[in-house]
Image: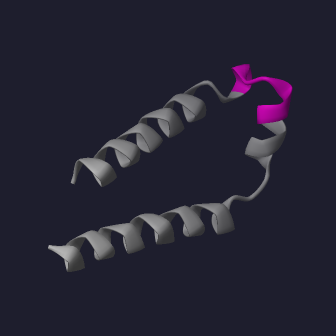
Amino acid sequence: MLAIGIPVALLLMFTLLLEHGRDRLPRWLQRLSERPSLIWNAGIGLIIALSFLRWLLQR
């Protein structure tokens, strides 16, 4: 559970930090934050879900 919980917690924490300080980001991060990220987020979610499923099946 630590292998999944810690990365998810860090991802959520840093996402909130980035959203909070959006207007103070460096220029290259501002450019990246303007792009739609649905595909990226879906891919990361799929990786996390499949890793969790694998962990459950190995128990």
Callout count: 0
The residue depicted at 41 percent of the width and 38 percent of the height is 10
Q: Which quadrant of the view contains residue 57?
A: bottom left
Location of residue 13 in the rendering, given as x and y in whole percent from the top left corner: 42, 35
Query: Residue 43 in the image: x percent, y percent?
Result: 58, 68
In-front residue for pair 1/40: 1
| Lateral position of residue 38 relative to residue 34, left or right | left
Identity of the residue furthest to the bottom in this view? 57
Position of residue 22 in the picture relative to residue 43 (left or right): right
Q: Is residue 26 magenta?
A: yes
Query: Would residue 16 be found to the left or right of residue 27 on screen?
Result: left
The answer to whether residue 1 is above or below residue 19 is below
- Residue 29, given in percent of the width and then of the height, sits at 77, 34
Magenta segment includes 10? no
**What range is drawn magenta here?**
23-29
> Residue 31 appears in which quarter of the rendering?
top right
- For the N terminus, which image quadrant? bottom left
Q: Residue at x 79, y 23 (%)?
A: 26
Residue at x-position 78% and y-position 44%: 32
Relative depth, front residue between 58 and 18: 58
Task: Please say if 3 is above or below 31.
Answer: below
